[in-house]
Amino acid sequence: MAKPDDRTVRTRRRSDGARTHEQILATAMELASVEGLGSLTIGRLARELDLSKSGVFAHFRSKARLQQQTIEAAREVFEREVLEPGLDAPDGLARLESLCEAYLSYVERGVFPGGCFFAQLLAEFDAPRGPIHDEVVELQRGWLALLERLIGTAKERGELDSSVDAQQLAFDLYAPLELANYLSVLRRDPTVVERGRTAIRATLTSAGRREGDRNRLGGRPTKE
Amino acid sequence: MAKPDDRTVRTRRRSDGARTHEQILATAMELASVEGLGSLTIGRLARELDLSKSGVFAHFRSKARLQQQTIEAAREVFEREVLEPGLDAPDGLARLESLCEAYLSYVERGVFPGGCFFAQLLAEFDAPRGPIHDEVVELQRGWLALLERLIGTAKERGELDSSVDAQQLAFDLYAPLELANYLSVLRRDPTVVERGRTAIRATLTSAGRREGDRNRLGGRPTKE
DNA sequence: GAATAAATAGTACGACCGTGCTATCTATTC
DNA sequence: GAATAGATAGCACGGTCGTACTATTTATTC
Protein backbone atom coordinates (compact mmCIF):
# COMPACT_ATOMS: atom_id res chain seq x y z
CA MET A 1 0.00 0.00 0.00
CA ALA A 2 3.01 2.24 -0.10
CA LYS A 3 2.71 1.93 -3.81
CA PRO A 4 0.09 4.06 -5.63
CA ASP A 5 -3.35 3.21 -4.41
CA ASP A 6 -5.37 0.49 -5.99
CA ARG A 7 -7.55 2.64 -8.15
CA THR A 8 -4.62 4.17 -10.01
CA VAL A 9 -2.43 1.13 -9.79
CA ARG A 10 -1.94 0.47 -13.44
CA THR A 11 0.59 3.03 -14.65
CA ARG A 12 -0.60 6.46 -13.73
CA ARG A 13 1.39 8.02 -16.53
CA ARG A 14 -0.04 5.60 -19.01
CA SER A 15 -3.60 6.35 -18.01
CA ASP A 16 -2.96 10.10 -18.09
CA GLY A 17 -2.09 9.78 -21.73
CA ALA A 18 -5.17 7.75 -22.52
CA ARG A 19 -7.32 10.23 -20.65
CA THR A 20 -5.93 13.17 -22.57
CA HIS A 21 -6.41 11.25 -25.78
CA GLU A 22 -10.08 10.80 -24.99
CA GLN A 23 -10.51 14.44 -24.03
CA ILE A 24 -8.93 15.55 -27.27
CA LEU A 25 -11.26 13.33 -29.26
CA ALA A 26 -14.28 14.52 -27.30
CA THR A 27 -13.46 18.13 -28.07
CA ALA A 28 -12.63 17.22 -31.66
CA MET A 29 -16.07 15.67 -32.12
CA GLU A 30 -17.79 18.76 -30.75
CA LEU A 31 -15.80 21.14 -32.89
CA ALA A 32 -16.20 19.02 -36.00
CA SER A 33 -19.94 18.68 -35.56
CA VAL A 34 -20.22 22.46 -35.50
CA GLU A 35 -17.59 23.67 -37.92
CA GLY A 36 -16.85 20.59 -39.97
CA LEU A 37 -14.09 18.05 -39.83
CA GLY A 38 -12.20 20.01 -42.46
CA SER A 39 -11.77 23.08 -40.31
CA LEU A 40 -10.77 21.04 -37.31
CA THR A 41 -7.31 22.21 -36.43
CA ILE A 42 -4.59 20.97 -34.13
CA GLY A 43 -3.79 24.43 -32.86
CA ARG A 44 -7.43 25.11 -32.16
CA LEU A 45 -7.74 21.88 -30.19
CA ALA A 46 -4.62 22.75 -28.21
CA ARG A 47 -6.02 26.17 -27.31
CA GLU A 48 -9.38 24.70 -26.36
CA LEU A 49 -7.76 22.13 -24.06
CA ASP A 50 -4.88 24.20 -22.71
CA LEU A 51 -2.28 21.99 -24.26
CA SER A 52 0.60 22.73 -26.56
CA LYS A 53 0.24 22.10 -30.25
CA SER A 54 2.93 19.47 -30.14
CA GLY A 55 1.30 17.88 -27.12
CA VAL A 56 -1.85 17.34 -29.12
CA PHE A 57 0.00 16.42 -32.28
CA ALA A 58 1.98 13.69 -30.51
CA HIS A 59 -1.24 11.80 -29.85
CA PHE A 60 -1.97 11.35 -33.55
CA ARG A 61 1.24 12.01 -35.48
CA SER A 62 -0.73 13.31 -38.46
CA LYS A 63 -3.85 15.28 -39.10
CA ALA A 64 -5.30 12.47 -41.18
CA ARG A 65 -5.10 10.12 -38.22
CA LEU A 66 -6.71 12.71 -35.99
CA GLN A 67 -9.61 12.92 -38.43
CA GLN A 68 -9.88 9.15 -38.71
CA GLN A 69 -9.95 8.69 -34.97
CA THR A 70 -12.44 11.50 -34.54
CA ILE A 71 -14.78 9.74 -36.95
CA GLU A 72 -14.26 6.47 -35.13
CA ALA A 73 -15.00 8.11 -31.78
CA ALA A 74 -18.17 9.62 -33.21
CA ARG A 75 -19.15 6.22 -34.52
CA GLU A 76 -19.00 4.91 -30.99
CA VAL A 77 -21.14 7.75 -29.71
CA PHE A 78 -23.65 7.06 -32.47
CA GLU A 79 -23.68 3.41 -31.58
CA ARG A 80 -24.27 4.15 -27.91
CA GLU A 81 -26.76 6.97 -28.39
CA VAL A 82 -28.73 5.76 -31.40
CA LEU A 83 -28.12 2.17 -32.40
CA GLU A 84 -28.16 0.56 -28.97
CA PRO A 85 -31.32 2.18 -27.70
CA GLY A 86 -32.87 2.08 -31.14
CA LEU A 87 -32.36 -1.60 -31.69
CA ASP A 88 -33.47 -2.51 -28.20
CA ALA A 89 -37.05 -3.25 -29.24
CA PRO A 90 -38.93 -6.32 -30.40
CA ASP A 91 -37.90 -7.48 -33.84
CA GLY A 92 -39.82 -6.15 -36.82
CA LEU A 93 -41.75 -2.95 -37.33
CA ALA A 94 -41.38 -1.98 -33.69
CA ARG A 95 -37.61 -2.04 -34.02
CA LEU A 96 -37.72 0.07 -37.17
CA GLU A 97 -39.90 2.65 -35.49
CA SER A 98 -37.74 2.58 -32.42
CA LEU A 99 -34.60 3.20 -34.44
CA CYS A 100 -36.08 6.25 -36.13
CA GLU A 101 -37.24 7.57 -32.80
CA ALA A 102 -33.80 6.95 -31.32
CA TYR A 103 -32.28 9.07 -34.06
CA LEU A 104 -34.76 11.88 -33.56
CA SER A 105 -34.24 11.79 -29.82
CA TYR A 106 -30.48 11.93 -30.34
CA VAL A 107 -30.98 15.03 -32.45
CA GLU A 108 -33.36 16.52 -29.94
CA ARG A 109 -31.04 15.92 -27.00
CA GLY A 110 -28.24 17.69 -28.85
CA VAL A 111 -25.79 14.87 -28.33
CA PHE A 112 -23.45 16.76 -30.66
CA PRO A 113 -23.66 20.54 -30.38
CA GLY A 114 -23.66 20.99 -34.16
CA GLY A 115 -26.23 18.30 -34.84
CA CYS A 116 -25.65 14.78 -36.05
CA PHE A 117 -21.94 14.29 -36.68
CA PHE A 118 -22.56 12.08 -39.68
CA ALA A 119 -25.08 14.35 -41.32
CA GLN A 120 -22.40 17.03 -41.12
CA LEU A 121 -19.88 14.60 -42.53
CA LEU A 122 -22.19 13.57 -45.36
CA ALA A 123 -22.70 17.13 -46.53
CA GLU A 124 -19.05 18.05 -46.12
CA PHE A 125 -17.55 15.06 -47.91
CA ASP A 126 -20.23 14.03 -50.36
CA ALA A 127 -18.35 15.70 -53.19
CA PRO A 128 -14.63 16.00 -52.45
CA ARG A 129 -12.81 12.78 -53.29
CA GLY A 130 -10.42 11.25 -50.82
CA PRO A 131 -10.24 8.73 -48.01
CA ILE A 132 -12.84 10.52 -45.90
CA HIS A 133 -15.28 10.54 -48.78
CA ASP A 134 -14.79 6.81 -49.14
CA GLU A 135 -15.36 6.31 -45.43
CA VAL A 136 -18.57 8.33 -45.62
CA VAL A 137 -19.79 6.25 -48.55
CA GLU A 138 -19.22 3.16 -46.44
CA LEU A 139 -20.98 4.57 -43.39
CA GLN A 140 -23.98 5.67 -45.43
CA ARG A 141 -24.18 2.32 -47.11
CA GLY A 142 -24.23 0.70 -43.69
CA TRP A 143 -26.93 2.96 -42.36
CA LEU A 144 -29.22 2.41 -45.33
CA ALA A 145 -28.52 -1.32 -45.27
CA LEU A 146 -29.59 -1.42 -41.64
CA LEU A 147 -32.84 0.34 -42.42
CA GLU A 148 -33.47 -1.98 -45.35
CA ARG A 149 -32.79 -5.03 -43.24
CA LEU A 150 -35.28 -3.93 -40.60
CA ILE A 151 -37.82 -3.20 -43.29
CA GLY A 152 -37.26 -6.63 -44.76
CA THR A 153 -37.89 -8.27 -41.43
CA ALA A 154 -41.04 -6.25 -40.87
CA LYS A 155 -42.27 -7.33 -44.29
CA GLU A 156 -41.59 -10.98 -43.56
CA ARG A 157 -43.59 -10.65 -40.39
CA GLY A 158 -46.46 -9.11 -42.28
CA GLU A 159 -46.18 -5.83 -40.43
CA LEU A 160 -45.42 -4.00 -43.62
CA ASP A 161 -47.13 -4.65 -46.89
CA SER A 162 -45.26 -7.10 -49.07
CA SER A 163 -45.41 -4.72 -52.00
CA VAL A 164 -43.29 -2.20 -50.16
CA ASP A 165 -39.97 -1.40 -51.86
CA ALA A 166 -37.43 -1.66 -49.04
CA GLN A 167 -34.91 0.68 -50.64
CA GLN A 168 -37.56 3.27 -51.33
CA LEU A 169 -38.98 3.08 -47.82
CA ALA A 170 -35.48 3.38 -46.35
CA PHE A 171 -35.07 6.56 -48.39
CA ASP A 172 -38.49 7.83 -47.28
CA LEU A 173 -37.58 7.34 -43.64
CA TYR A 174 -34.05 8.63 -43.88
CA ALA A 175 -35.10 11.89 -45.55
CA PRO A 176 -37.13 13.38 -42.68
CA LEU A 177 -34.54 12.25 -40.12
CA GLU A 178 -31.87 14.14 -41.98
CA LEU A 179 -33.93 17.26 -42.55
CA ALA A 180 -35.11 17.34 -38.96
CA ASN A 181 -31.47 17.33 -37.94
CA TYR A 182 -30.41 20.19 -40.19
CA LEU A 183 -33.39 22.40 -39.48
CA SER A 184 -33.37 21.86 -35.73
CA VAL A 185 -29.79 23.09 -35.66
CA LEU A 186 -30.42 25.95 -38.06
CA ARG A 187 -33.22 27.46 -36.09
CA ARG A 188 -32.09 26.75 -32.54
CA ASP A 189 -35.36 25.03 -31.97
CA PRO A 190 -35.81 21.29 -31.37
CA THR A 191 -39.50 21.71 -32.20
CA VAL A 192 -38.70 20.84 -35.79
CA VAL A 193 -37.96 17.32 -34.62
CA GLU A 194 -41.68 16.93 -34.10
CA ARG A 195 -42.14 17.47 -37.84
CA GLY A 196 -39.81 14.57 -38.36
CA ARG A 197 -41.79 12.39 -35.97
CA THR A 198 -44.99 13.17 -37.79
CA ALA A 199 -43.43 12.38 -41.13
CA ILE A 200 -42.03 9.07 -39.91
CA ARG A 201 -45.34 8.09 -38.38
CA ALA A 202 -47.24 8.88 -41.57
CA THR A 203 -44.81 7.00 -43.75
CA LEU A 204 -44.80 3.91 -41.59
CA THR A 205 -48.55 3.95 -41.21
CA SER A 206 -48.94 4.19 -44.94
CA ALA A 207 -46.51 1.37 -45.61
CA GLY A 208 -48.21 -0.83 -43.07
CA ARG A 209 -51.79 -0.09 -43.88
CA ARG A 210 -51.84 -1.06 -47.47
CA GLU A 211 -52.22 -4.74 -46.89
CA GLY A 212 -55.52 -4.33 -45.11
CA ASP A 213 -56.56 -1.66 -47.56
CA ARG A 214 -55.34 -3.38 -50.63
CA ASN A 215 -58.53 -3.01 -52.59
CA ARG A 216 -59.13 0.54 -51.66
CA LEU A 217 -55.49 1.52 -52.28
CA GLY A 218 -55.30 3.88 -49.38
CA GLY A 219 -52.61 6.51 -49.47
CA ARG A 220 -51.01 7.93 -46.40
CA PRO A 221 -53.76 8.52 -43.92
CA THR A 222 -52.54 11.14 -41.53
CA LYS A 223 -50.89 14.47 -41.33
CA GLU A 224 -50.31 16.29 -38.08
CA MET B 1 -9.39 49.52 -88.13
CA ALA B 2 -6.35 50.76 -86.28
CA LYS B 3 -8.65 51.31 -83.36
CA PRO B 4 -10.05 48.28 -81.48
CA ASP B 5 -12.51 46.49 -83.69
CA ASP B 6 -16.22 47.07 -83.48
CA ARG B 7 -17.09 44.13 -81.30
CA THR B 8 -14.87 45.35 -78.47
CA VAL B 9 -15.59 48.99 -79.02
CA ARG B 10 -17.39 49.80 -75.79
CA THR B 11 -14.70 50.22 -73.16
CA ARG B 12 -12.59 47.19 -73.43
CA ARG B 13 -11.05 47.81 -70.06
CA ARG B 14 -14.35 48.40 -68.35
CA SER B 15 -15.95 45.27 -69.73
CA ASP B 16 -12.85 43.24 -69.04
CA GLY B 17 -13.28 43.98 -65.38
CA ALA B 18 -16.91 42.98 -65.30
CA ARG B 19 -16.15 39.85 -67.25
CA THR B 20 -13.39 38.81 -64.89
CA HIS B 21 -15.69 39.52 -61.97
CA GLU B 22 -18.25 37.12 -63.38
CA GLN B 23 -15.67 34.47 -64.09
CA ILE B 24 -14.36 34.69 -60.55
CA LEU B 25 -17.84 34.27 -59.15
CA ALA B 26 -18.59 31.37 -61.48
CA THR B 27 -15.49 29.54 -60.30
CA ALA B 28 -16.22 30.51 -56.70
CA MET B 29 -19.67 28.93 -56.91
CA GLU B 30 -18.26 25.72 -58.31
CA LEU B 31 -15.54 25.48 -55.71
CA ALA B 32 -17.89 26.37 -52.86
CA SER B 33 -20.49 23.83 -53.90
CA VAL B 34 -17.85 21.12 -53.73
CA GLU B 35 -15.64 22.11 -50.84
CA GLY B 36 -17.78 24.54 -48.94
CA LEU B 37 -17.88 28.30 -48.82
CA GLY B 38 -15.62 28.22 -45.78
CA SER B 39 -12.71 26.67 -47.59
CA LEU B 40 -13.11 28.98 -50.55
CA THR B 41 -9.83 30.83 -50.77
CA ILE B 42 -8.63 33.83 -52.70
CA GLY B 43 -5.32 32.23 -53.53
CA ARG B 44 -7.05 29.13 -54.77
CA LEU B 45 -9.34 31.18 -57.00
CA ALA B 46 -6.35 33.05 -58.37
CA ARG B 47 -4.55 29.81 -59.22
CA GLU B 48 -7.66 28.36 -60.82
CA LEU B 49 -8.15 31.43 -63.00
CA ASP B 50 -4.52 32.30 -63.72
CA LEU B 51 -4.73 35.60 -61.95
CA SER B 52 -2.71 37.08 -59.15
CA LYS B 53 -4.03 36.97 -55.63
CA SER B 54 -4.24 40.73 -55.50
CA GLY B 55 -5.98 40.80 -58.85
CA VAL B 56 -8.75 38.64 -57.45
CA PHE B 57 -8.78 40.40 -54.12
CA ALA B 58 -9.24 43.81 -55.74
CA HIS B 59 -12.62 42.73 -57.06
CA PHE B 60 -14.06 42.23 -53.58
CA ARG B 61 -11.78 44.04 -51.09
CA SER B 62 -12.58 41.49 -48.39
CA LYS B 63 -13.24 37.80 -48.13
CA ALA B 64 -16.61 38.44 -46.53
CA ARG B 65 -17.73 40.37 -49.61
CA LEU B 66 -16.47 37.59 -51.84
CA GLN B 67 -18.61 35.13 -49.88
CA GLN B 68 -21.63 37.40 -49.95
CA GLN B 69 -21.39 37.92 -53.67
CA THR B 70 -20.85 34.22 -54.27
CA ILE B 71 -24.06 33.48 -52.40
CA GLU B 72 -25.87 36.16 -54.36
CA ALA B 73 -24.58 34.76 -57.64
CA ALA B 74 -25.73 31.29 -56.62
CA ARG B 75 -29.12 32.70 -55.74
CA GLU B 76 -29.43 33.94 -59.27
CA VAL B 77 -28.49 30.55 -60.66
CA PHE B 78 -31.05 28.94 -58.40
CA GLU B 79 -33.66 31.40 -59.55
CA ARG B 80 -32.90 30.73 -63.20
CA GLU B 81 -32.49 26.97 -62.92
CA VAL B 82 -35.15 26.10 -60.35
CA LEU B 83 -37.58 28.86 -59.53
CA GLU B 84 -38.25 30.14 -63.03
CA PRO B 85 -38.90 26.79 -64.68
CA GLY B 86 -40.53 25.45 -61.53
CA LEU B 87 -43.03 28.25 -61.18
CA ASP B 88 -43.89 28.28 -64.87
CA ALA B 89 -46.91 26.04 -64.46
CA PRO B 90 -50.61 26.59 -63.82
CA ASP B 91 -51.36 27.90 -60.36
CA GLY B 92 -52.08 25.36 -57.64
CA LEU B 93 -51.03 21.76 -57.19
CA ALA B 94 -49.48 21.64 -60.66
CA ARG B 95 -47.13 24.45 -59.75
CA LEU B 96 -46.14 22.77 -56.51
CA GLU B 97 -45.36 19.56 -58.32
CA SER B 98 -43.52 21.42 -61.01
CA LEU B 99 -41.34 23.21 -58.47
CA CYS B 100 -40.31 19.96 -56.83
CA GLU B 101 -39.54 18.45 -60.19
CA ALA B 102 -37.53 21.54 -61.14
CA TYR B 103 -35.39 21.07 -58.05
CA LEU B 104 -34.83 17.39 -58.73
CA SER B 105 -33.97 18.11 -62.32
CA TYR B 106 -31.50 20.77 -61.21
CA VAL B 107 -29.85 18.21 -58.99
CA GLU B 108 -29.89 15.63 -61.74
CA ARG B 109 -28.37 17.96 -64.29
CA GLY B 110 -25.53 18.74 -61.91
CA VAL B 111 -25.95 22.49 -62.23
CA PHE B 112 -23.40 22.81 -59.43
CA PRO B 113 -20.68 20.19 -59.47
CA GLY B 114 -20.95 19.62 -55.71
CA GLY B 115 -24.72 19.43 -55.66
CA CYS B 116 -27.18 22.11 -54.62
CA PHE B 117 -25.24 25.14 -53.45
CA PHE B 118 -27.78 25.93 -50.76
CA ALA B 119 -27.96 22.44 -49.38
CA GLN B 120 -24.22 22.67 -48.95
CA LEU B 121 -24.62 26.07 -47.34
CA LEU B 122 -27.33 24.82 -44.99
CA ALA B 123 -25.19 22.00 -43.65
CA GLU B 124 -22.09 24.15 -43.40
CA PHE B 125 -23.63 27.12 -41.64
CA ASP B 126 -26.51 25.62 -39.71
CA ALA B 127 -24.51 25.71 -36.51
CA PRO B 128 -21.76 28.37 -36.63
CA ARG B 129 -23.12 31.78 -35.75
CA GLY B 130 -22.34 34.76 -37.91
CA PRO B 131 -23.63 36.75 -40.85
CA ILE B 132 -23.65 33.77 -43.19
CA HIS B 133 -25.68 31.74 -40.75
CA ASP B 134 -28.21 34.55 -40.60
CA GLU B 135 -28.34 34.71 -44.37
CA VAL B 136 -28.95 30.97 -44.54
CA VAL B 137 -31.76 31.22 -42.01
CA GLU B 138 -33.34 33.85 -44.21
CA LEU B 139 -32.95 31.82 -47.40
CA GLN B 140 -34.40 28.69 -45.80
CA ARG B 141 -37.30 30.65 -44.41
CA GLY B 142 -37.99 31.95 -47.91
CA TRP B 143 -37.83 28.51 -49.49
CA LEU B 144 -40.18 26.97 -46.96
CA ALA B 145 -42.50 29.96 -47.18
CA LEU B 146 -42.67 29.49 -50.92
CA LEU B 147 -43.61 25.84 -50.54
CA GLU B 148 -46.21 26.70 -47.94
CA ARG B 149 -47.70 29.39 -50.13
CA LEU B 150 -48.08 27.00 -53.04
CA ILE B 151 -49.62 24.42 -50.73
CA GLY B 152 -52.03 27.02 -49.45
CA THR B 153 -53.14 27.88 -52.95
CA ALA B 154 -53.59 24.24 -53.84
CA LYS B 155 -55.73 23.80 -50.75
CA GLU B 156 -57.89 26.78 -51.64
CA ARG B 157 -58.43 25.32 -55.05
CA GLY B 158 -59.46 22.03 -53.53
CA GLU B 159 -56.54 20.18 -55.06
CA LEU B 160 -55.17 19.30 -51.67
CA ASP B 161 -57.31 18.24 -48.76
CA SER B 162 -58.25 21.12 -46.51
CA SER B 163 -57.06 19.22 -43.45
CA VAL B 164 -53.49 19.22 -44.75
CA ASP B 165 -51.03 21.05 -42.51
CA ALA B 166 -49.12 23.29 -44.91
CA GLN B 167 -45.99 23.49 -42.77
CA GLN B 168 -45.88 19.75 -42.31
CA LEU B 169 -46.39 19.06 -45.99
CA ALA B 170 -43.68 21.58 -46.86
CA PHE B 171 -41.37 19.63 -44.57
CA ASP B 172 -42.46 16.33 -46.10
CA LEU B 173 -41.65 17.58 -49.59
CA TYR B 174 -38.45 19.34 -48.69
CA ALA B 175 -36.96 16.28 -46.98
CA PRO B 176 -36.71 13.99 -50.02
CA LEU B 177 -35.47 16.85 -52.20
CA GLU B 178 -32.62 17.45 -49.83
CA LEU B 179 -31.71 13.81 -49.36
CA ALA B 180 -31.85 13.14 -53.08
CA ASN B 181 -29.34 15.93 -53.50
CA TYR B 182 -26.87 14.67 -50.91
CA LEU B 183 -27.04 11.04 -51.92
CA SER B 184 -26.83 11.69 -55.65
CA VAL B 185 -23.58 13.54 -55.06
CA LEU B 186 -22.23 10.99 -52.61
CA ARG B 187 -22.61 8.05 -54.90
CA ARG B 188 -21.85 9.63 -58.24
CA ASP B 189 -25.16 8.38 -59.45
CA PRO B 190 -28.14 10.55 -60.37
CA THR B 191 -30.34 7.47 -60.12
CA VAL B 192 -31.06 8.37 -56.52
CA VAL B 193 -33.02 11.34 -57.81
CA GLU B 194 -35.63 8.84 -58.93
CA ARG B 195 -36.13 7.88 -55.28
CA GLY B 196 -36.87 11.52 -54.62
CA ARG B 197 -39.39 11.64 -57.45
CA THR B 198 -41.17 8.61 -56.10
CA ALA B 199 -41.28 10.06 -52.60
CA ILE B 200 -42.65 13.39 -53.82
CA ARG B 201 -45.30 11.67 -55.91
CA ALA B 202 -46.44 9.50 -53.02
CA THR B 203 -46.61 12.42 -50.62
CA LEU B 204 -48.58 14.62 -52.99
CA THR B 205 -50.91 11.81 -53.95
CA SER B 206 -51.59 11.11 -50.32
CA ALA B 207 -52.22 14.76 -49.50
CA GLY B 208 -54.53 15.17 -52.44
CA ARG B 209 -56.47 11.98 -52.26
CA ARG B 210 -58.04 12.38 -48.90
CA GLU B 211 -60.73 14.78 -49.99
CA GLY B 212 -62.31 12.27 -52.32
CA ASP B 213 -62.01 9.67 -49.63
CA ARG B 214 -63.36 11.79 -46.87
CA ASN B 215 -66.32 9.65 -46.03
CA ARG B 216 -64.64 6.35 -46.47
CA LEU B 217 -61.34 6.93 -44.81
CA GLY B 218 -62.08 9.77 -42.51
CA GLY B 219 -60.77 12.96 -44.03
CA ARG B 220 -59.35 14.17 -40.79
CA PRO B 221 -56.22 12.86 -39.25
CA THR B 222 -57.16 9.44 -38.06
CA LYS B 223 -54.91 8.82 -35.12
CA GLU B 224 -54.79 5.30 -33.95
C1' DG C 1 -0.31 63.17 -76.78
C1' DA C 2 -0.97 64.09 -71.78
C1' DA C 3 -3.90 63.07 -68.09
C1' DT C 4 -7.01 60.00 -65.97
C1' DA C 5 -8.98 55.99 -64.18
C1' DA C 6 -9.70 51.15 -64.15
C1' DA C 7 -7.78 46.43 -64.00
C1' DT C 8 -4.22 43.71 -62.73
C1' DA C 9 0.40 42.39 -60.76
C1' DG C 10 4.06 42.58 -57.24
C1' DT C 11 5.58 42.59 -52.68
C1' DA C 12 5.31 42.46 -47.78
C1' DC C 13 3.36 41.42 -43.22
C1' DG C 14 1.48 39.00 -39.42
C1' DA C 15 -1.33 34.95 -38.30
C1' DC C 16 -2.07 30.26 -38.38
C1' DC C 17 -1.40 25.79 -40.52
C1' DG C 18 0.92 20.80 -40.25
C1' DT C 19 4.96 18.69 -38.91
C1' DG C 20 9.72 17.61 -37.47
C1' DC C 21 13.36 17.83 -33.89
C1' DT C 22 14.80 18.44 -29.21
C1' DA C 23 14.12 19.19 -24.30
C1' DT C 24 11.75 18.52 -19.90
C1' DC C 25 9.21 16.33 -16.56
C1' DT C 26 7.58 12.33 -14.05
C1' DA C 27 6.11 7.33 -13.00
C1' DT C 28 7.83 2.80 -13.49
C1' DT C 29 11.47 -0.54 -13.54
C1' DC C 30 15.79 -2.42 -12.49
C1' DG D 1 18.94 5.86 -6.96
C1' DA D 2 20.03 5.26 -11.88
C1' DA D 3 17.96 4.12 -16.05
C1' DT D 4 13.98 4.01 -18.84
C1' DA D 5 10.03 5.31 -21.25
C1' DG D 6 5.94 7.89 -21.90
C1' DA D 7 3.54 12.47 -21.97
C1' DT D 8 3.99 16.99 -22.83
C1' DA D 9 6.29 21.49 -24.11
C1' DG D 10 9.30 24.51 -26.96
C1' DC D 11 11.02 25.95 -31.07
C1' DA D 12 11.79 26.14 -36.03
C1' DC D 13 10.50 25.44 -40.83
C1' DG D 14 8.03 26.19 -45.07
C1' DG D 15 3.45 27.02 -46.68
C1' DT D 16 -0.97 29.43 -47.15
C1' DC D 17 -4.16 32.60 -45.49
C1' DG D 18 -6.31 37.62 -45.70
C1' DT D 19 -5.07 42.13 -46.53
C1' DA D 20 -2.32 46.55 -47.13
C1' DC D 21 0.43 49.31 -49.92
C1' DT D 22 2.76 50.24 -54.34
C1' DA D 23 3.65 49.49 -59.32
C1' DT D 24 2.41 48.70 -64.08
C1' DT D 25 -0.39 48.35 -67.99
C1' DT D 26 -4.06 49.95 -70.93
C1' DA D 27 -8.59 52.41 -72.75
C1' DT D 28 -10.87 56.52 -72.42
C1' DT D 29 -11.04 61.46 -72.09
C1' DC D 30 -9.48 66.00 -72.69
Image (cartoon, coloured by chain):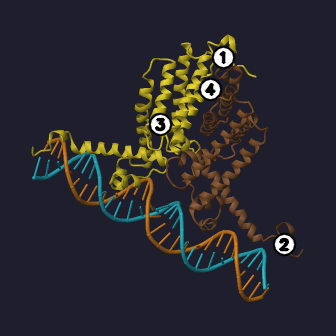
Chain colours: A brown, B yellow, C cyan, D orange
Confirm or deny contact between disc 2 and disc 3 (CB under 8 A): no
Q: Nearer the viewer, mark 2 or mark 4?
A: 4
Residue that mark 3 sits on: B107
* Mark 1 residue element: loop
Q: Chain of mark 3?
A: B
Confirm or deny contact between disc 4 and disc 3 (CB under 8 A): no
Marks 2 and 3 sit apart, C-alpha to C-alpha, by: 63 Å
- In the foreground, A182 or B61: A182
Kind of residue at disc 1 = Arg
Residue A148: x and y in percent read 66, 39
Q: Are marks 4 and 1 on the same chain?
A: no
- In the foreground, B128 or B74: B74
Mark identifier at residue A216: 1
**Where the C terminus of chain A falls, by quadrant?**
top right
Q: In the rendered view, does B207 fall on the left or right side of D16? A: right
* Mark 3 residue element: helix
Using a 10 Å C-alpha cutoff, classify the residue at mark 2 as few (fewer than 14 neighbours), some (14 to 19) or many (20 or more).
Answer: few
Q: Nearer the viewer, mark 2 or mark 1?
A: 1
> In which image quadrant can residue A10 be found?
bottom right
Sequence order check, earlier mark of 2 and 1: 2
Residue that mark 2 sits on: A4
Q: Chain of mark 1?
A: A
Kind of residue at disc 3 = Val
- In the foreground, B97 or D23: B97
Q: Chain of mark 2?
A: A
Confirm or deny contact between disc 2 and disc 1 (CB under 8 A): no
Q: Are marks 4 and 3 on the same chain?
A: yes
User: Residue placed farthest to the top in the image?
Assistant: B215
Q: Chain of mark 4?
A: B
Mark identifier at residue B197: none
